[in-house]
Amino acid sequence: MARYNAKEAERHWQAEWEARALFATPGHSDKPKCYVLEMFPYPSGRIHIGHVRNYTMGDVIARFRRAQGYNVLHPMGWDAFGLPAENAARDKGVSPRDWTYENIAAMREQLKMMGLSLDWSREFATCDVEYYHQQQKLFLDFYQAGFVYRSEADVNWDPVDMTVLANEQVIDGRGWRSGAIVERRKLSQWFFKITQFADELLAGLDSLDNWPDKVRLMQKNWIGKSEGLRFQFALSNGEKLDVFTTRPDTLFGASFVALSPDHPLTQELARKDEKLEAFIAECRKTGTAEAEIEKAEKLGYDTGITAAHPFDDSWHLKVMVANFVLMGYGTGAIFGCPAHDQRDLEFARKYALKVIAVVVPSDADPEAFEVGTEAYTGPGRLANSRFLNGLTVEEAKTEVAMRLEAAGIGQRTVHYRLRDWLVSRQRPWGCPIPMIHCEKCGVVPVPKDQLPVKLPEAINFNVKGNPLDADTAWKNTTCPTCKGRAVRDTDTLDTFADSSWYFTRFTDPAADAPVNKAAADYWLPVDQYIGGIEHAILHLLYARYFTRAMSKLGMVKVAEPFAGLFTQGMVCHETYMDAEGNWVSPDEIEKRDGKAFFRDTGQEVKIGASEKMSKSKKNVVAPEPIIAEYGADTIRWFMLSDTPPERDIEWTDAGAEGCWRFVQRVWRLCTEAKDLPVPGTPAAADDETSKSLRQATHKAIAAVTEHLEHLRFNSAVAQLYTLANAMGAADQANPSARREALEALVLLSAPMMPHLAESCWQSLGHTSLVAETAWPKYDPALTASDIVTIAIQVNGKRRGEITLAKNADSKDVEAAALAEEGVKRALDGKAAKKVIVVPNRIVNIVA
RNA sequence: GCCCCGGUGGUGGAAUGGUAGACGCGGCGGACUCAAAAUCCGUUGCCGCAAGGCGUGGGGGUUCAAGUCCCUCCCGGGGCACCA
């Protein structure tokens, strides 16, 4: 029998699917809808193996749901603006547009080779004029609604990418992409007012039941809500000072007030105080890197000013400048309560300030309780706190807040760690911000009928700074209001804006407004979104924000874009290193007896840990040669086998060969099957072998369905192996049972190996396509056998097993258990004190 | 430091509190073959000839019964971080 020719078959079926337009999704249908989406790729030019894993998972869900009778939307597009195109343009002298579209063309072909059931009719790239045209409209809608503002602010400047970054895009003080140490600069920039929805974005997380807890937690921490009290100190220089605290209950434990080095009052004082100026400079030397902060000593500077305690005018607290107080959080000023805050405690010990314990844990003696080197932050009752004494922490917080509010110097407030989203980028390959700057009229939005603001045809990279800024012909324009001379905003939007609403655009990519509401309301939310964990905060938070903002503007009905989220693990590979310590590519080596050697020289190579594939470690395996050798189904099957989808998977050649063997095995089972009845023939009477094969078939249908519902692809795969094994062992079964088993095997494996399934289906005599065939149903009567094996334990240790009819009477089970040889031996004549019978499962005898 | 998530054979990993190790990879033995590839069959947690004993990171606990629940410690991974 001929081996399965994957290459030929895959080409054939892909053409067949396309000819029948099977995956082009109708806008309307009586079927329930299901929107399946994988995070769209950046068009780098080649798909990598991580894409293969991501898109395979999405495709399995899409095909599975389609077979189950859903109207499935499964689109694909390109996140096509961004720096790599600019770098290529600069290095190779090509246009970023041509470079990007060529890459898209190449990657589209590669994706098509994978046999993904995508609706290519909805494809678009974010650099398409049509897409960014709609995005510019959206920006103006946001602007009109007051969701966008311009502000002069300290910004994060990435000196390598030559652009500003949003807070989320600075990781450990470095640019998320370039890794360069970020500098602070003052610039006038556009912001999305994401903090406006901070509370909603936080509360919305609770409704996202089908998101990983981990991602919800990360977003919660990122939003960083803290409830507290903002209140005023009267200072000895006559000024007022606002501070924020989450612990107003500890106000009587205050022993100092501290200002950030960047606080306006500090700056003002420094103008007349050289030593303070020197101190501020000293503070700035401490970097933002994690390690530095950890080692950094608490430093303070006494301003000589004092602050009056809000509950006692005669109580004066020193006002210090302290290096650990951040201007970016709260008001940039705090009151220090050393007994109940670790940082304040370290500071107080260093500058010999008082440490007064005002919260006493319930198990401690209020008279004797003292704080040593560790601040006490737990619950307890107030002490040394006048009118608060005896109250709990919560009661005291309320009491202080109420009194200060009544006195008109305090207010309960909520603070968020989340900052507004800075979206201006000084880059030429992005969506131009549709704004005009006029000397007379100020900032004027481009009228919608003058959109799109198109990027220039040619971008000249031989200039300093932003090429759009240097392109005077592009930049100079007339003011829409006064018709006088004006200039365009030369910044482009952060590319994260492009990916914040593309999933909505897919619901009708040809709409002449950003959103076709009917289409969006039909399809949204995305039922299953799949992508990498690296987007847990940035992309997913921005997309949630956009959806919420669009929802406020009545463009979409939903507030949350992604009902279900799945974050898949990375693809890893072993690393290899030669004797000189250079990384060695897997292509250069061969393995024997668990050791690795250079293919050329035979010299041994050291095998290192399996790590995320990366160019620098040379442990990259490209998908195309694998598809060329084994076909798409094999690599798809590998990606789903063995490892749970959320974990990192290790690529191994041996594993890939194993998958290839299975492809051939399924093919052989289907093509070598003899004397099968024609499709649709009623079942024959079954003998024992046939019956047990039928049971295996129906168990597999039930189990695979259940596993796929829960995205447990690896377990679904295992069930299919089990069914194939049962097939192999049952060639004595009657033809109708064998046909039933084979058809189930083919249909159940079709979402994972769609081409192979079509070939097998055809060879089983069908003229329809699997892609048009309904998901098989199981007969509950056949998923369980009527004979059960029951284990017998004596004192919790397994001593034997008995085989009985299902649902046998407990008395009979007990009797059979006590009569079992191993059990008798273990009891050694002793009487059973107690016998626990768990029906159809286990018997435990307590002796 | 704080917060998550993990730790199961040689290996990737299964396991509603109820027979630990499904299924895959690898190994071993065999069949077919002049031979090899491919394929098929058997076997494979550890110790032991066997009977049996021991086994899910360590220690303790709850339970008739614990990989699973509770406490505690160790190790690995991830996130956050002078956030007041």
Image (cartoon, rainbow, N blue to C red):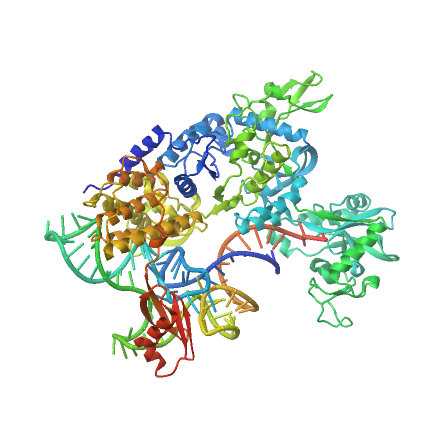
Front one among A266 and A521: A521
Q: Is residue A563 visible?
A: yes
Decide which of B84, A706 is in the foreground and name it.
Answer: A706
Q: Is residue A119 above or below residue A690?
A: above
Q: Nearer the viewer, residue A88 or A722?
A: A722
Viewer-proximal residue among A315 and A847: A847
Image location of residue A20, percent across then percent down: 35, 29
- Residue depicted at x 54% and y 30%: A518
Q: Is residue A382 left or right of residue A701?
A: right
Farthest residue, direction top: A483
Identity of the residue drawn at 80% across and 43% down: A268
Name the outermost residue toward the bottom.
A829
- Place of residue A550 in the rendered image (x, y in percent of width and height, measured from the top left): 61, 34
Taking A383 as reference, is A564 left or right? left
- A385 to A564, vertically: above or below: below
Quadrant housing the N terminus of chain A: top left
Q: Is residue A484 left or right of residue A780?
A: right
Give the image location of residue A830, x and y in percent: 37, 83
Which quadrant holds residue A515?
top right
Q: Find the residue positioned furthest to the right.
A: A314
Is A352 displayed left or right of A658 in the figure?
A: right
Counting every numbered tag in the picture gives: 0
* Relative image position of residue A465 (x, y in whole percent): 59, 29
Placement of the C terminus of chain A among the 4 image quadrants = bottom left
Q: Report whether residue A575 is seen.
A: no
Q: Is residue A354 above or below residue B81?
A: below
